[in-house]
């Protein structure tokens, strides 16, 4: 009986420490919790999102001309 009580106290203390760490880090996990509570502690750090590169105005214009030619060709083929 004493062992179960000690384990319960240790688990409660661990939960308090986990909440304190989350508060200090400022990042709270979102979404469905993992099935294994230890998996969250061992999980790999999140990857940083890579910045998407946009098209330059010249490339955008060239792409526009290519697509206009493509759709014009498709319209001609479908009208046959």
Image: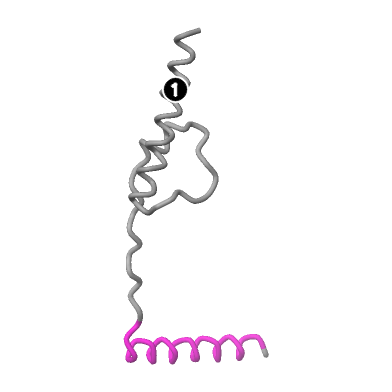
Up-down relation of residue 48 to residue 10 (above or below): below
- The crowding category of the residue bearing disc 1, from other C-alpha atoms within 10 Å (few below 14, some 14 to 19, many at least 20), is few
User: Where residue 48 sits in the image (x, y, percent)?
Assistant: 33, 58
Classify residue 41 by image quadrant: top left
Q: Which residues are magenta?
A: 55-78
User: Where residue 75 sits in the image (x, y, percent)?
Assistant: 61, 89
Q: Residue at x 33, y 75 (%)?
A: 53
Main secondary structure along the magenta-highlighted residues: helix
Q: Residue at x 38, y 49 (%)?
A: 23
Up-down relation of residue 37 to residue 80 (above or below): above
Please tell me which residue lies in front, 41 or 16: 16
Please tell me which residue lies in front, 3 or 55: 3
Q: Residue at x 39, y 53 (%)?
A: 27
The residue indicated by pointer 1 is 9
Taking the image as shown, residue 11 lies to the left or right of residue 47, namely right
User: Where residue 29 sits in the image (x, y, percent)?
Assistant: 45, 48
Please tell me which residue lies in front, 24 or 80: 24
Q: Is residue 58 magenta?
A: yes
Taking the image as shown, residue 67 lies to the left or right of residue 53, namely right
Q: Secondary structure at mark 1?
A: helix
Please tell me which residue lies in front, 22 or 63: 22
Quadrant of the rendering where the C terminus is positioned: bottom right
Q: Residue at x 32, y 86 (%)?
A: 56
């Amino acid at each position: 009986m004493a062992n179960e009580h000690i384990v319960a106290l240790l688990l409660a203390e661990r939960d308090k420490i986990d909440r304190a760490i989350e508060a200090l880090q400022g990042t709270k996990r979102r979404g469905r919790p993992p099935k294994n509570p230890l998996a969250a502690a061992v999980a790999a750090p999140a990857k940083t999102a890579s910045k998407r590169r946009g098209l330059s105005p010249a490339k955008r214009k060239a792409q526009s001309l290519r697509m206009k030619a493509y759709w014009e060709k498709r319209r001609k083929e479908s009208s046959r």
